[in-house]
Amino acid sequence: MFSSLFTEHELWAVIHGLVLGTLFLLAFGGGLAGLWSLQDRFVTPEGVAERTPRLLWGTTIMAVVAWLTVLTGTFIVYPWYRAKPPAGTVDLSGFPRSLLLADEKSAFWHNFGMEWKEHVAWTAPFLATAVAFIVIYYGPRLVHHAEFRRVLLIMFTLAFMAAGVAGLFGAFITKAAPVS
């Protein structure tokens, strides 16, 4: 059924951007809410016991999905993006990088947007993994360490922002030069 709707390249682009990106957003929301609400003034000991598993799941899922997103993008979708056209090729529609660089107006999407996606987006899984590890290690003890939670919130948000900007650039790049 899907083979008639999408090429293999398009299907992997959808998995990379839409499916994993959506899971990333949902996990971020759960992890952020869990970190924010894990405060002495908001929860009883029973509440901490109830919220901790959700916090563990939210941060761990976000880290795993961040890795899956970066790995599928880097090792599956990105090589198709960078494919070089044979000498003398006029129609560059099957060669997204070359298509973008062929026009001065669209070269920005490669020169800045893809550079962000290639390099800065890798910070998202590293930061998300650090947060997940700390949450797993400290668990309910985080409720008594407001400064530590604040650092985790900042790291978690930076991971989200790096991935969010990469996703936004990905959407624009795919619009300008789709991987087909």
Image: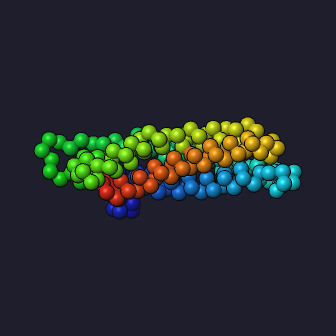
Q: Can residue 46 be seen in this view?
A: no
Q: Which residue is rendered at x = 38% and y = 48% of the image?
A: 113
Q: Visible in this render: residue 93?
A: yes
Position of residue 65 measured from the top left corner of the image (x, y, whole percent): 55, 47
Which corner quadrant of the image does residue 93 belong to?
bottom left
- Residue 52 point in image, percent of width and height: 76, 49
Q: Residue at x 32, y 49 (%)?
A: 108
Q: In this view, does 31 lie to the left or right of 168?
A: right
Depth check, front residue: 128 or 77:
128
Please state if 118 lies on the left or on the right of 123 as rendered. left
Q: Is 25 in front, or is 172?
A: 172
Query: Which residue is at a point 84% across and 51% down the rendered structure image?
Result: 40
Q: Where is residue 123 in the image (x, y as percent from the top left)?
A: 52, 40
Q: In this view, does 133 lie above or below 92?
A: above
Picture quadrant of residue 138? top right
Q: With respect to residue 175, does 128 lie above or below?
A: above
Q: In which quarter of the image is the N terminus?
A: bottom left
Q: Position of residue 33 (x, y in %)?
A: 69, 55
Q: How is the image coloured?
A: rainbow
Residue in the image at 73% along x and 41% along y: 148
Side (left or right) of 104 relative to 164: left
Quarter in which the C terminus is drawn: bottom left
